[in-house]
Image (cartoon, rainbow, N blue to C red):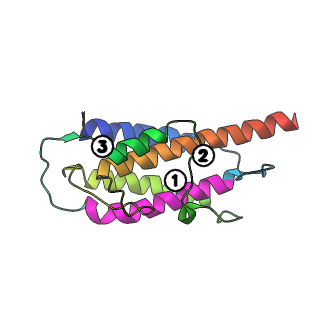
Amino acid sequence: MNTQTQLQLQIFAGLDKLDARLRHADLSGVPSSGWSVAQVLEHMAILNTDYLKRLRPIATRSEPLADGNWRPTLLGGYLTTALTKPAKLTTPAAARPGPQARPGVLSALLDSHAELRELIRQAEPLCWRRLKLTSPYAWFLRPNFGDACLLILRHGERHAAQIDRLTSTRVSTSA
């Protein structure tokens, strides 16, 4: 079992690394198949926005902190673990990017990370295990606050690795 403080520190450190990686991503070019780097960023921004909409109302509830321990829900733990595996996962239709990413997609994504940090700070005194939300993509998934925050981080890490692969493939094929 983790404490909420340990999870908060893990998420903040992960977001810092992720933001630094993404700031240096090469957004140009389109692969021969699949999403461009900009489309990957758009997908990440869409998912973050959808989850943040669900996190905002519960981050300010006034439920006392029970014991400071946090553990994932069964499905929340499964999802966050699945995102660390290399296996291809199905993208929910609502989170698929269009043919072109919005202008300023990287800024929008980094702003969503800043908002996540702020929501975590607001929810710090609350019992994250008791703060449940419904997934924006599957009504039957009810992650807790910590699950959803960790899911955003793991999802970002997964796609940052995809961006690395896209840019290294483009560099190696052009060399």
Q: Relative to residue 89, is residue 81 drawn left or right?
A: left
Front position in the image: 6 or 35: 35
Tell me which amino acid carries mark 1: Leu
Q: Is residue 171 above or below residue 100?
A: above
Q: Does the magenta-highlighted stretch encompass residue 47?
A: yes
Examine the image and state in which quarter residue 54 appears.
bottom left
Q: Residues within 10 Å of mark 2 (few under 14, many from 20)?
A: few
Q: Residue 46: where, in percent of width, then height? A: 53, 61
Disc number placed over residue 23 in the picture, else none: 2
Tell me which amino acid carries mark 3: Pro
Question: Which is more foreground, mark 3 or mark 1?
Answer: 3
Q: Which residues are magenta?
A: 38-59
Q: Relative to residue 28, is residue 86 drawn left or right?
A: left
Q: Is residue 3 above or below residue 113?
A: above
Cβ atoms under marks 3 and 1 closer than 8 Å: no
- Secondary element under disc 3, as helix, strand or loop, is loop
- Secondary element under disc 1, as helix, strand or loop, is helix
Cβ atoms under marks 2 and 1 closer than 8 Å: yes
